[in-house]
Image (cartoon, grey):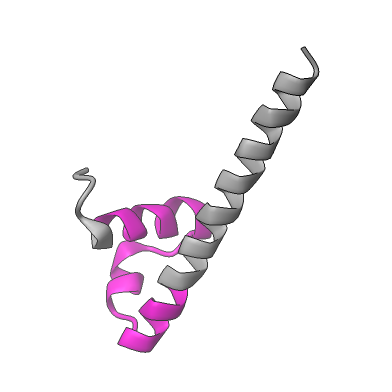
Amino acid sequence: MKEGDADANYAYYALHKLRILPHELMNMSLREKAVIYAMIDYRIEQDRKEEAKARMMSRNKR
């Protein structure tokens, strides 16, 4: 999957994490997709913050 193909990346995440089939995502209204995409962005940002915090805690334990 290309890094720059945002729709494909969102569809991949929606399928694997949210169990939304690609055709279901593509058939959503623009507003529904915007909400799903915003929630995915938020979740990814939260996951990144948690990973960074865990790495920092791991380094501090050494």
Screen quadrant of the C terminus: top right
Residue 39: x and y in percent read 51, 69
Q: Residue at x 20, y 52 (%)?
A: 4
Q: Is any atom of residue 57 visible in this view?
A: yes
Q: Is residue 14 magenta?
A: yes
Residue 33 shown in magenta: yes
Decide if residue 13 is on the left or right side of residue 29: right
The residue drawn where x is 48% and y is 63% is 40
- Residue occupying the point 65% across, 28% down: 55
**Residue 35: quarter of image:** bottom left
With respect to residue 52, does 27 lie above or below?
Answer: below
Q: Nearer the viewer, residue 17 or 57?
A: 57
Q: Indicate the quadrant where residue 10 lies.
A: bottom left
- Please tell me which residue lies in front, 21 or 62: 62
Report the number of numbered marks.
Answer: 0
Quadrant of the snapshot with the N terminus: top left
49 left or right, relative to 23:
right
Residue drawn at point x = 38 percent, y = 79 percent: 34
Q: Which residues are magenta?
A: 8-36
- Residue 29 can be seen in this image: no
